[in-house]
Image (tube, rainbow, N blue to C red):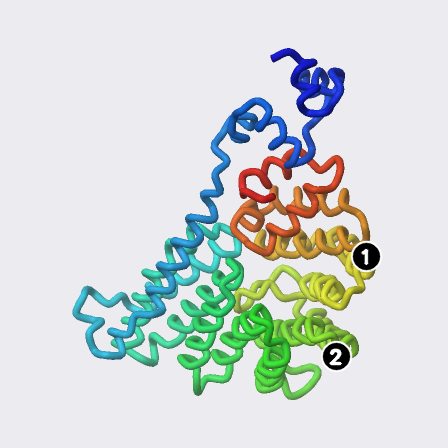
Amino acid sequence: MTQQMLADRLGRSKSWVDKVERGVRALDKVSTFRDIAVVLRVDASVLLGRDVEPAEVTERVAGVERIRAALSTYDIVLGAGTARGVVLPADRLAQDVTHAWITFQHARYPQVVALVPGLLAAAQSAHAEAPEPGRAVLVEAYRVTSSLLVKLGEGELGWLAADRAVAAAAGDPVLVATACVQLGQALRATGRARAARSVTLAAAYRIAPPGPDDGVPAELSLCGTLLVQAALAAARDGDHRAAADLLDEAGDLGARVGDGHDHHASAFGPTAVDLARAAAAVELGAVRDAVAWHERTVRRNAWRWLPPEHRAAHLLDAARAYLRTGDPRGAGRVLLDAERTAPAELRHRPAARQVIAQVTRAPHAPATLVQLALALGLP
């Protein structure tokens, strides 16, 4: 097929085809890739030189089903769990839970999916064997499971895991508060913003230090994280004033804690609070404020101290804000930053798919994002 024949069938000029072949012009739309593939009678993957089947989707579904099966096992409480093998001690399981949290915070979601079913079974067995020593480990196992499921778009299942964490933590105010962080996230993800706000506020004020100068960093971080969750729930519910007040309250605690800490796997500090201000602004429709908070906050050194998962999740929020201000180039730029920071945030998080699809439909979308959209099977 000559260049002219290809150009005629695509409705393009011969000069356009020549520039594409020589690499002078980039293919910047998913639809253009597909049009060329149709004319050449080849699969789009041939044009990219690799398999572009959305394997991530298949793997995610299979992994979620394994986690669902683990959460659906009741033989521990029925007295049939400990006969299957050696029960690991709580201190060993605590190391495994820490490893799972670190892996999650580095956005290695497929690895966490593989870890969680065995971690849940081991933590349940340890708690059945020694309820008090094994309780904190079980709560943390459910917490990381809930965070992962919400990230993967499985809010209802994440709610179940968070509810299990709260039940296991009952009687210990701090453990209950840690579990309520994930409970608030899951409730918000499932459209229950008012319930999320209520539960996170109740947990925050239950553990709040009695005076303005009281409290240790771990307590302040947990209380501040719950206030941030309550603020995001208020923003989802359209309550501008409550969201602002709660974020200001969290900001006061963040200033006392400082940046660079990760108490209770929260990464709480002034920078995390200001990123939450951007997320709340997106929820409230104040997208120019969201962009301003984003651009101001990512210039700080403390931005780089946050876990990759936290940064990439924020960049996805920032991409939404740029899109809503009519700036698809800005959205594409921050999505590429997210891809470099934590590729799995875009490849395994369903919430990212719509944003990627919107950006790649715009003229002159980055070729890397176009290829990613094709790999994910986006229209």
Tell me where residue 378 sits by quadrant.
top right
The label on residue 304 is: none
- Graded by Cα atoms within 10 Å as few (under 14), some (14 to 19) or many (20 or more), the crowding at tag 2 reads some
User: Residue 8 in the image: x percent, y percent?
Assistant: 70, 19
Q: Residue at x 76, y 78 (%)?
A: 245
Q: Residue at x 49, y 29 (%)?
A: 50
Nearer the observer, 286 or 121: 286
Q: Residue at x 72, y 18 (%)?
A: 19
Residue that carries the numbered disc 2 in the rendered image:
242
Q: Residue at x 31, y 71 (%)?
A: 124
Q: Is residue 157 left or right of residue 318?
A: left
Above or below for 323 versus 84: above
Q: Quadrant of the C terminus?
A: top right
- Graded by Cα atoms within 10 Å as few (under 14), some (14 to 19) or many (20 or more), the crowding at tag 1 reads few
Judged from this view, the residue extending furthest toward the top is 2
Q: How many marks?
A: 2
User: Residue 172 in the image: x percent, y percent?
Assistant: 46, 84
User: Residue 167 in the image: x percent, y percent?
Assistant: 42, 81
SS type, badge 2? helix
Nearer the observer, 217 or 247: 247
Residue that carries the numbered disc 1 in the rendered image:
292
Earlier residue among tags 1 and 2: 2
Residue type at mark 1 is Ala
Q: Disc 1 versus disc 2: distance between alpha carbons? A: 21 Å
Q: Are marks 1 and 2 in contact (CB under 8 Å)?
A: no
Above or below for 311 versus 200: above
Residue type at mark 2 is Ala
SS type, badge 1? helix
